[in-house]
Amino acid sequence: MSLELTADERRIANGTDGAAMAMRIVAESAALLGAPRLLPIASAHIDGALYHGDSGTLFAERLVEGGARVGVRSTLNVGALDLMGCSRVRLEEPQRSMARRMMEAYRKLGCEQSWTCAPYQAGHRPALGTDVAWGESNAVVFCNSVLGARTNRYGDFLDIACAISGRAPDYGLHRPENRLARLVFDVSALPRTFMASEIAWPVLGSLYGREVGDAVGVVTGVTKNPGEDALKAFGAAAASSGAVGLFHIAGVTPEAPDAETALGGVDAETVIRVTPDMVAEAQARLSTAENADRIDAVAIGSPHLSLAEFDALERLMSGRRLTVPIHACTGRHVLGELDRDGRRKVLEDLGVVIVADTCVVVTPILPDRSGGVLMTNSGKFAHYAPGNTGYAVLYGSLADCVESAVAGRPLFAEIKR
């Protein structure tokens, strides 16, 4: 099947400016993917503005020099610098200057200065059934699964090319037939006390990703909607441990009023019946630190913390001063609310390090410490932190993280599985 462009798409691609460059990138990618055509998109979320090397900066500046501008609403994922000045990023020159140039180039391209991996909690919520082009694994899986918009996982450079051209290749999860579940992930055998706990959803997400890979599945046996932050944590962990781009939860997510609808009325190819032992093993796998009797840092907010999650953090801290800092990663949309209410200063005075516009696993913020131990309640942090920060990880609930940060040593409450 060959790619067919419209007359307008061909006209733009035949130009010499930045818009032509973007259209050619999208068209050539579509041809490689076997897409028959390009789709108009309603919005984009750009992951390519995170500095990984000079080529990314030079690419963005080339688009700017060519007069390119985004043609649809485009929010930005985290960058490599905390532009709000909340935390100290240890990125040295010349990388620091190149990272700043990169962030500035994306501003000039017309992208919103959101700098968050949770744009869906910062007002960017495309409608059910809308085609979009989003990057960043957790944002993609939330967009597809919880909002019911349609996107593939658009990688660096293709994401901004889609945003400028207003087009995306017509393939993968843009197509309704590819959004149907092929397997069932049944959690009905798990105790309700566990399902109601905070740790359930990151742990289940980690297990789900390992079990299904990139397949579309439907979770059954969930008796109530766990809430947006829990779904956020599930999707982020699933996209990190596997390559999940879309999940359904029967009775919860918009394309799954029931399992039969999610499966398209056919029998599942596979049924995974989750047991307490499987959950215990998945939870244990999230911790890589062995026999740890101390912690050196706590990090929460991957994906970025919502205002509701800050509310929970404050309740658990109860005005107590921390022995070990908690790095709380969030977006500037939440930071503004904390500043308006004077809450940020109170938290910082108690030992919380607010990190905005970025997070501790994508840029050097944590102290360079051999044998360091990081505690987190994030399945995504647990997955990426050892390789990206050099710290071993202890996984626990938010309450575990707070109690451990106050005490300066690991403390865990027992949860029945």
Image (tube, rainbow, N blue to C red):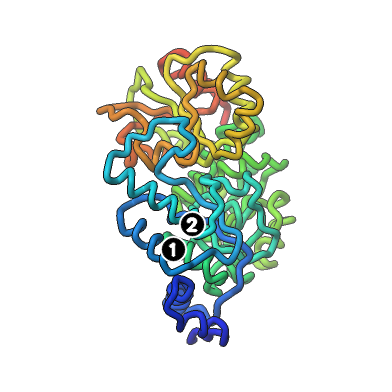
Name the residue at 49% across, 44% down: 206
Q: Callout 1 environment at 10 Å: few (<14), some (14 to 19), or many (20+)?
A: many
Give left or right: position of 110 versus 260.
left
Q: Which mark is residue 64?
A: 1
Name the residue at 32% across, 41% down: 387
Name the residue at 60% across, 21% down: 314
Q: Position of residue 205 (x, y in %)?
A: 53, 45
Q: Position of residue 359 (x, y in %)?
A: 44, 38
Q: Which mark is residue 176?
A: none
Which picture quadrant has residue 234?
Answer: top right
Considering every residue shown, the one lying at the far left of the view is 370
Q: Position of residue 208 (x, y in %)?
A: 52, 48
Q: Which residue is disc 2 drawn over?
A: 108
* Number of numbered markers: 2
Q: Of callouts 1 and 2, which one flags the residue occurring earlier in the amino acid sequence?
A: 1
Q: Are the two marked residues, 1 and 2, in contact with CB atoms closer than 8 angstroms? A: yes
Measured Cα–Cα span from mark 1 to mark 2: 7 Å
Give left or right: position of 336 versus 371.
right
Q: Callout 2 environment at 10 Å: few (<14), some (14 to 19), or many (20+)?
A: some
Amino acid under label 2? Lys
Name the residue at 33% across, 22% down: 291
Amino acid under label 1? Val
Report whether residue 191 is seen: no
Q: Is residue 343 above or below residue 330?
A: above
Report whether residue 235 is seen: yes
* Label 1 SS: helix
* Label 2 SS: helix
